[in-house]
Amino acid sequence: MDTALDSALRDAGLRATAGRVAVLEALDSMAHTDAERVFRAVSDVLPTTSIQSVHNILADLTTAGLIRRIEPAGSAALYERRIGDNHHHVVCTSCGAVGDVDCVVGEAPCLTPSSAGGFTVQTAEVTFWGLCPSCQNAAQ
Amino acid sequence: MDTALDSALRDAGLRATAGRVAVLEALDSMAHTDAERVFRAVSDVLPTTSIQSVHNILADLTTAGLIRRIEPAGSAALYERRIGDNHHHVVCTSCGAVGDVDCVVGEAPCLTPSSAGGFTVQTAEVTFWGLCPSCQNAAQ
DNA sequence: CCGTTCTTTTGAGTTACTCAAAAGAACGGG
DNA sequence: CCCGTTCTTTTGAGTAACTCAAAAGAACGG
C-alpha cells in the first residue's frame, strides 16, 4: 500500500525511498527549515542517514517541485512544503525567524516591473524585513 | 586636499584610507560586483591588499551605509554604490547577470503586506527572476 | 611630530554545501 | 517471486565565501 507521500514522490518521477518520505514528513511538521534541522529530524527515524544525503534529497525534491527553497540574505537555505502559490516571506532582522506572507496587492504589481533593462521577467520574489513578535517584546 | 570619496568616508565616520577609496572607485565603475571582482580591481592599484581586507572594507562600508549589499539566491554577495533609493533587482536565471529595476508601482504596495503574522515590517526587497538579453538570444 | 585609535594584514577556522566513486535499494519485466 | 537495470544513498574528500583574532601598520587630532 502506498501512502500519500509515496504517491507524491512517484507522481513527480522519483522513487519512494525512506529518506525522501522522512524529509517530506519533517517539512510537513516544520516550516522554513534548514538542512541541518531536517537532518536532525530525519535522523530520529533513519539513524544511518547523513547530512550530505539530506542535502541531496532536498535538492532532488526542490528540482521535482515538491518543496520550495528560499535563501534569505544572511542565513542558510530554508525549505518549505507550501508550494504552488507564490507566497512571500517576512524575516526577522534580529533572530532570523521566518513567516509567510500572502501575495500582497492582487499580485499584478509584484510581477510587472516598469522597466527591466531588457530582461524577460518570469517570477518575482518579495522578502519583507522586520521584527518578529518575540523580538518586538524583547526590544521594548 | 580631499577628494569627494575621502569626504564621503569621513562624513560617514570612517577614516579615508587608500583601500576604502579604491573599493569605492571600483564599485563606481562596476555595478553589482562580488568581493572577488572588487579584490581584483583593487589589487591593480593596491597590490598589497588581500581578499580578507576587501571583505572587511565591504562590511564596514555596508554598515556605514555607503554601499549596499545584496545576496541573490545562488550567488555570492554583491555590492553596489547606488543607495538611498530602494530600487530592486532582476537576476538572470541562466547566467546570474543582475540589473536594476526602479521601484514598481509607486512603492506603497511593496511595503504593505496584507498580513505579516505579527511581524513589524520595516523594508521590502523584491527580486525579479528572468533572462537577460544575451541569454534570451542564446536560447532562441 | 606623537600618541591614541582605527585599519589592514596575516593566518587560521568555519559553515554550508558540492562532487565523485562505490555500495545499496526500487521497481518493472519475466 | 526473483533479477537486473537504474536510481539513490553512503562515504569521504574538496571548495567557496566568509568570519575571527592577533599583531603590525596608518590616520589624524592635538
Image: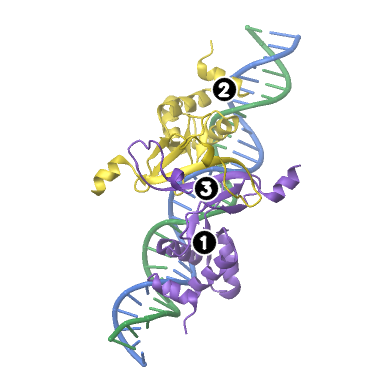
Chain colours: A yellow, B purple, C blue, D green
- Please identify, in this view, whether the residue under mark 3 or under mark 2 is nearer the observer: 3
Q: CA distance from mark 3 to mark 1?
A: 17 Å
Q: Are marks 3 and 2 on the same chain?
A: no
Q: Which mark is residue A60?
A: none
- Chain under numbered label 1: B
Residue found 46% across the figure and 66% down from its top? B57
Kind of residue indicated by mark 3? Val
Residue identified by numbered label 1: B82
Give the x, y percent position of residue A88. Answer: 46, 38
Q: Which mark is residue B104?
A: 3
- Where residue D2 sits in the image (x, y, percent)? 66, 11
CB atoms at circles 3 and 1 under 8 Å apart?
no
Q: Is B126 situated above or below C8?
A: above
Left or right, A28 with respect to A111, comes to left
Q: Nearer the viewer, residue C13 or B82?
A: B82
* Residue A59 appears in the rendering: yes
Residues indicated by labels 2 and 1 sit on the same polypeptide chain: no
Amino acid type at mark 1? Arg
Say which chain tag 2 marks.
A
Earlier in the chain: of badge 3 and badge 1, it is: 1
User: Camera-side residue: B33 or B114?
Assistant: B114
State the CA–CA distance, disc 3 to disc 2: 38 Å
Label 3 neighbour load within 10 Å: few <14, some 14-19, many 20+: some
Residue A9 - label: 2
The 10 Å Cα crowd at callout 2, few under 14, some 14 to 19, many 20 or more, is some
Q: Tag 1, which secondary structure?
A: loop
Q: Residue placed at 59% from the left, 63% from the top?
A: B30
Question: Please, what secondary structure does the residue beneath circle 3 have?
Answer: loop
Q: Chain of mark 3?
A: B
Amino acid at the residue labelled 2: Leu
Q: How far from the left and from the top, in percent, is residue A72? A: 46, 45
